[in-house]
Structures are given as C-alpha cells and as structure tokens.
C-alpha cells in the first residue's frame, strides 16, 4: 500500500468515525482541496499535509502513515480490537431492538 492509499484510508476512517464531510475535514486541517487532489491522483500528500492531519488526530500512527509499519491506530491491535467489538455490539443491539419492536406489534 502506498503513502497516498494509507493517507486516504486514515481520511476515510476519520470521516466515518466523526461523520464529517471531506471538505469539512480539509477545512479543519487547513487543507484546500488536498484530499480531493490526492484521491484523484493529481498529487501525493505533502509532509505539511501529513503533519496537519496527525496533529489534529493524534490517535493515528505516524509510522503507519509514513512507512506502512504497524497498525493504523496508535495503541496497536488493542484499539482496533475494541473498535471491532464495539461495531459487533452495536449490530447486535440493533437486531435486538428490531426483535423487540416486532414482538410489540
């Protein structure tokens, strides 16, 4: 996976977790259309862009982004495992709520 792919993976993860638009993320990071240009292949993320992103979102690993080493999130596998478990629990909770609603009808 190339630097631009890791950068976009982090951008997409931030957007998914925070439910913000790409333009809002660019605004918060002081990047004007950088993400769009990286996504279209026009540019690669600059060191300045990477520093801005990581300075706002400390939970992401610089080693992962810059070198492709380790996990995307700091704290390694534990944080990733907890996020996966949380997704599973949210899914189970939703299904349980649907069953309860069906029984109430």
Image (cartoon, rainbow, N blue to C red):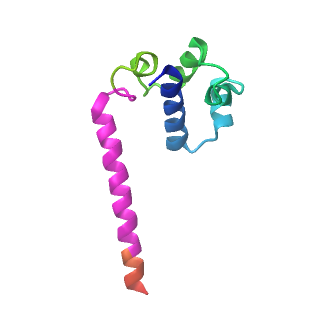
Residue 32 lies in what quarter of the image? top right
Q: Quadrant of the C terminus?
A: bottom left
Q: Return the x and y of residue 59 as percentages of the image width and height.
A: 42, 28
Q: Return the x and y of residue 25 as percentages of the image width and height.
A: 62, 33
Residue 67 vertical placement versus 38 (above, below): above
Q: Return the x and y of residue 49 as percentages of the image width and height.
A: 60, 18
Q: Is residue 30 left or right of residue 4?
A: right
Residue 64 vertical placement versus 18 (above, below): above
Is 85 part of what is drawn in magenta? yes
Q: Is residue 34 left or right of residue 15?
A: right
Extreme residue in the top direction: 47
User: Magenta region, mostly helix, strand or loop?
Assistant: helix
Q: Quadrant of the N terminus?
A: top left
Relative depth, front residue between 93 and 65: 65
Residue at the spot 51% in from the left edge and 27% down from the top edge: 5
**What is the span of residues highlighted in magenta in the rendered image?**
71-98
Relative depth, front residue between 74 and 4: 4
Residue at the spot 39% in from the left edge and 17% down from the top edge: 63
Residue 38 lies in what quarter of the image? top right
Residue at the spot 41% in from the left edge and 16% down from the top edge: 67
Residue at the spot 45% in from the left edge and 21% down from the top edge: 65
């Amino acid at each position: 996976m190339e630097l631009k792919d890791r950068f976009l993976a982090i951008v997409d993860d931030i957007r998914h977790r925070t439910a913000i638009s790409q333009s809002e993320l660019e605004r918060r990071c002081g990047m004007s259309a950088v993400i769009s240009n990286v996504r279209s292949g026009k540019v690669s993320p600059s060191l300045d862009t990477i520093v801005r992103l990581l300075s706002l979102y400390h939970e992401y690993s610089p080693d992962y982004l810059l070198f492709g080493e380790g996990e995307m999130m700091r704290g390694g596998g534990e944080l990733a495992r907890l996020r996966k478990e949380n997704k599973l629990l949210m899914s189970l909770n939703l299904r349980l709520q649907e069953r309860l609603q069906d029984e109430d009808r």
